[in-house]
Image (tube, helix red, strand yellow):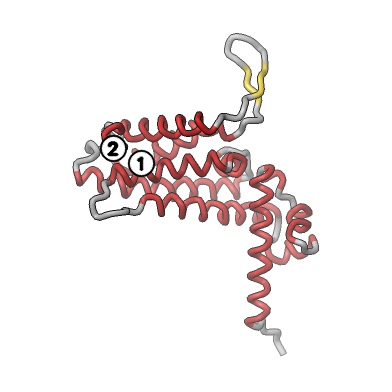
Amino acid sequence: MAYRETELTRAKKTLTRERLLKAARDLVAQGGFAAATAAAVAEKSGVAAGTIYRHFPNKSELVAEVFRYATEHEVANVLAASEPLTSNDSCTQRLQRALVCFAERALRGPQLAYALIAEPVDPRVEQERLKYRLAYAEIFEELIRDGIVSGEFVAQQASVSAAALVGLLSEALIGPLFPGQTLTTDNTSAVAARAAITESEQQQLIQQLSALCLRALGVNAHTHA
């Protein structure tokens, strides 16, 4: 007689998978994707190492799933920030909240954000990174389209502008998100460690990025703060 998986068995497998993903995400938040080894995930989850391969065929699939697991949560927060708070909420205000949310969450969890945005990964995970960027672009694109209709933004190709905003935010945040990296100056061969930025500097950076993004869309950010 063929084995049939019971609901209880399926529920246990789902809970174990969720535990593995959460443990892997926590490891990535501490040390990047390189830290999410099968052994480390198993130890943090409190399961045998072999259990991982019952849920994920190899590390590449595990990391890709962790990437998806982590990014769904981040995208959901930015989407929530973009929702109107009142009937009079403008597209500019909604977009500004989404931009600020993106930057604030990244700076609060720099190691995880750097891993999601820029850490070198294999092609399988890079596919998930592209989906991650597209998910943000779709949020921005809808707001830009509505803002063009309402006259808040100048006429433009919304999809291109949205993708550009994602790129602008990502590139501008890479340095601050990875304070342990070393920098070589243009004038000398000296290498200096980048110091972590302060809370005040973070807020200034967020404001500058938000204002820059809105100006790029033809909006004076000072009138919509």
| Secondary element at image label 1 | helix
The residue lying at 66 percent from left, 81 percent from top is 8
Camera-side residue: 17 or 90? 90
The part of the image, by quadrant, that contains residue 54 is bottom right
The residue lying at 67 percent from left, 18 percent from top is 191
Specify whether 138 is left or right of 105: left
Asked if 185 appears above or below 1 in the picture, the reply is above
The amino acid marked with disc number 1 is: Gln
The residue lying at 44 percent from left, 44 percent from top is 101
The part of the image, by quadrant, that contains residue 96 is top left
Q: Name the residue furthest front.
A: 200
The residue lying at 68 percent from left, 67 percent from top is 16
Query: Which mark is nearer the camera, 2 or 1?
Result: 2
Q: Position of residue 75 (x, y in %)?
A: 47, 51
Q: Which mark is residue 187?
A: none
| Secondary element at image label 2 | helix
**Mark 1 Cα-neighbour bin, 10 Å: few <14, some 14–19, many ≥20:** many
Q: Which mark is residue 224?
A: 2
Q: Which mark is residue 96?
A: 1
Asked if 187 appears above or below 30 in the picture, the reply is above
